[in-house]
Amino acid sequence: MIVGAAGVFAVGWWWAMLPALILNAIYWYRYNSKHGFHNFKNQLLALVVSFIYYFGLLSVALAISHYNYLQLPVWFPAFFFPYNLTSLTIAVGMFYDNLGWMFIGTFWSALLGIGLYQARTKQLPKLNGKQLTGLVVLMIVSFLPIYQNFANNLKFTNSYGEVSSLHLSQYRPFAGSKHLVTVHKSTNLSIPSDYPKLNGATALYPVYSAAAQALYTGVSAKQGAKLIRVDSTPKAFNSLLKKKSDVIFMAKPSNAQFKTAKEKHVDLKLTKIGTEAFVFFVNQKNPVSNLSVKQIQSIYQQKTVFWSSVGGQFNYIQPFQRPEGSGGQTAMEQMVMKGRKMVKPMRYQEFDAMDGVVDGVAGYNNHTNAIGYSFRFFATQMMHNQRIKLIKINGVAPTPQNIRNGKYPLVGSFYAITRGHPSRNSRQLIAWLKSADGQSLINRTGYVGIKK
């Protein structure tokens, strides 16, 4: 209780535990001095029992959660309530990182206080072989949090080499970007004023950013940054409903998004402008290179939990997901699962940003056992992470040719979406994207247009 009260800040900063442990040692020393103990067997037994209970419970819980502190349930601190303020703080903030050290520190600081008293009174016991072995075992066990903390800190590391990161600034319009596709000839459309405000999915930013740069005239880079935004699929969709965007670019909205639009009395107009492959990827060192749609469904329903079941090594499968309402998650639900319910992911298995899935599969926990999904262009061009590999689906690779001829089984459309009565310039922009010039831009960007 002393450590739990005085060491409450240690849940965030390990060094804050030291004063509490010193105070704990002083308490045990004074407790022994006051009562003049000569037989320390019961005290030691009580300390060992409590150590086994608290540290053992934490170790079992961490083993079940694959040494990931974020998976520990919120009710777990109730089992060590005698640590009072610490348990309450952890229950609220879920700060488990230094918990193992707190249990170990409590044990050894108490033993230190007792030992100092024994040394002062010249009553230090001589340890026999079994007692000495037990002490060595306790010391070894006490170092386990080093591995636990080490494993916890390994998540999302560059363990297989350089892990790329996403730089959306390279697709910013009107900024002289070399990554944006440009139109080399004069187009049959230019928009000199009343510019439509654009937003959309991260993966489609290179498309609508390039379109705006080709059509909008007299726009500065600063002005362009306000007109052409990239806020992810859910935020872009909400911006359309709130009239903060005129045209958004994304995959087909989810049923929940259609329902939200209806509740807000917003009529949506969807115009198909291109197609894209929905892809799955694994770490490049994972031997699995092909999965069937049924196998993927089984993995995300957690009916298949080991890679050995699908031709890989005997290793647990980490199935990463995206949040509900994101473009990737909607595509996963509509194209792959088709009404089958996915198992709710652990907190560490869900990524708000699409690039997080790619980097996670590339180096999660220094292992090769993760699988994730995204869209082909994003995973291969925008991220261009050399530490992942796309896998074949039903034996077919996601190449532009296989997308166009329909052999690749997971191909979805992406749309330009407006409210029911778009402005004249918004209609012209969308019409241009469907024209030969617009389709050429889409194809040259790296997507597959609806026209060759």
Image (cartoon, rainbow, N blue to C red):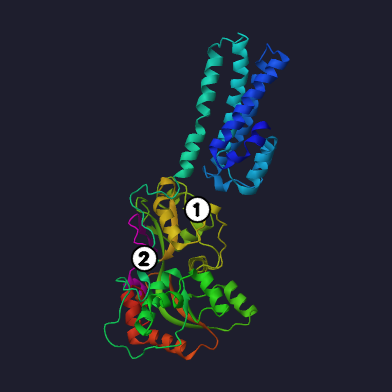
Q: Nearer the viewer, residue 437 or 37?
A: 37
Whole-Å distance between the Cαs marked 1 and 2? Answer: 31 Å
Percent position of residue 364, x then y? 43, 50
Left or right of residue 3: residue 183:
left
Percent position of residue 276, x then y? 40, 72
Amino acid type at image mark 2: Met
Disc 2 crowd, CA 10 A, few/some/many (<14, 14-19, 20+): many
Asked whether disc 1 touches disc 2, contact meaning CB atoms under 8 Å apart, the reply is no
**Which one is earlier in the sequence, the residue at label 1 or at label 2?**
1
Percent position of residue 265, x then y? 63, 82
Q: What range is drawn magenta here? A: 380-403
Residue at 50 percent across and 50 percent down: it is: 305
Q: Nearer the viewer, residue 451 or 37?
A: 37
Look at the image and tell me whether residue 77 can be seen: yes
Q: Nearer the viewer, residue 175 or 314?
A: 175
Quarter holding residue 116 = top right
Percent position of residue 261, x then y? 60, 78
Disc 1 crowd, CA 10 A, few/some/many (<14, 14-19, 20+): some
Q: Nearer the viewer, residue 90 or 371?
A: 90
Label 2: which secondary element: helix
Q: Is residue 382 magenta?
A: yes
Q: Which residue is mark 1?
A: 304
Amino acid type at image mark 1: Thr
Q: Which residue is mark 2?
A: 382
Quarter of the image where the C terminus is located? bottom left
Residue at 38 percent across and 67 percent down: it is: 169
